[in-house]
Amino acid sequence: MIHCEGLVKIYKTEEVEVMALQGLNLDVEDGEMMAIIGASGSGKSTLLNILGGLDRPSAGQVRVGEWDLTKISEQDLVRYKRSTVGFIWQNNARNLLPYLTALENVTLPMLLNGRYDVNRAKELLDAVGLSHRMKNRLEQLSGGEQQRVAIAIALANQPKLLLADEPTGAVDTATAEVIMNIFREINREMGVTVLIVTHDLALAKKVDRVVAIRDGLTSSEFLRGGYAPSGAPGGQGDLHQEFTVVDRVGRLQIPQEYLQEMGIRDKVILEFDGEKILIKPPSQEDSLTHAEETFPSGTQTIS
């Protein structure tokens, strides 16, 4: 469903240039439900905006289904956003029009796409548990109910891909649980690919795969079905296994906390014992040997 290779996004102003994505690689299978996690500024929302057709990449490849988003025309981009992808924002004001009822909000995307179907709109509201709230406006709905209406809106035009940007960020834990269960049901019953961007590691228990982004690059993955090490999503004993991602030229990102714990700065020693690759900091003897090789006995240096 999604293929990103060497994806780069650079934001420029007159005074500053920021590289939000630095060659990110990502593949998402059709029908998968997964989460993208990362700290603020890691590039996860930038990635979501590109996949949603709201922003253009600076370089690299990005495909969603049959669409090549690096070469798509403006006219086709409108078609893509109306038919292939549904978007859910954390801020409900971006999802709903306050002067329309819940039912009218869900039918609006259908009207824009020329496929008005009030019965389907009612079915979608029923699917998110809001059949009794169809005639209510924004101010009459709780935050969790507004977010559930937003999910129904995103599904109005039968998209193949559902993108959610921090969908549980503005609700309490119990409501977040309800919303995540709705995503899972939609994924299973409708076959929609679901991609959720979040900073909440607890979501790992609710999805098939979690991909971590650090500094605009894919750094690690957590897959359901293994035993998670201490510090992985959900804590020790969670049914997820962590993998560090190796890109196409053999680079990997070692977590910063590991580097700090081992006292590693700018170089390491790699050893292969036939089964495992060992990474360790250079010892003082290694540093002295390197210095002797670089500056043989009798060589003078100028400081």
Image (spheres, helix red, strand yellow):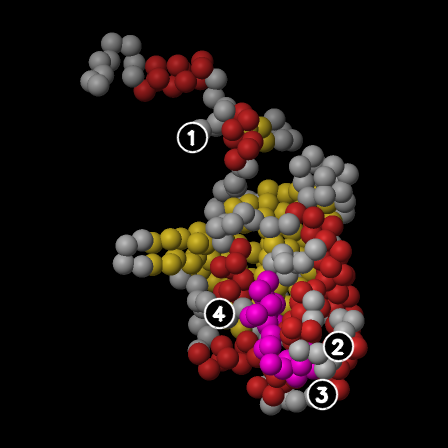
Q: Are marks 2 and 3 in contact (CB under 8 Å)?
A: no
Kind of residue indicated by mark 3 = Val
Q: Earlier in the sequence, mark 1 or mark 2?
A: 2
| Residue at the extreme top | 298
Nearer to us of marks 1 and 2 is: 2
Name which quarter of the figure residue 132 lies in. bottom right
Mark 4 lies on residue: 54
Separation of residues labelled 1 and 2 (CA atoms): 58 Å
Quadrant of the image containing the C terminus: top left
Kind of residue indicated by mark 1 = Asp
Name which quarter of the figure residue 122 lies in. bottom right
Separation of residues labelled 2 and 4 (CA atoms): 30 Å
Residue occupying image coordinates x 43% and y 57%: 8
Mark 3 lies on residue: 118
**Image height check: is 31 above or below 291?**
below
Check disc 2: other Cα within 10 Å, few if <14, some if 14-19, many if 20+: some
Check disc 3: other Cα within 10 Å, few if <14, some if 14-19, many if 20+: some
Residue occupying image coordinates x 63% and y 47%: 221
Label drawn at residue 266: 1
Residue occupying image coordinates x 45% and y 15%: 284
Q: Position of residue 112 (x, y in %)?
A: 57, 86
Count the labels in the image: 4
Mark 2 lies on residue: 133
Is residue 192 visible from the viewing direction of this image?
Answer: no
Q: Earlier in the sequence, mark 4 or mark 1?
A: 4
Q: Which residues are magenta?
A: 85-106
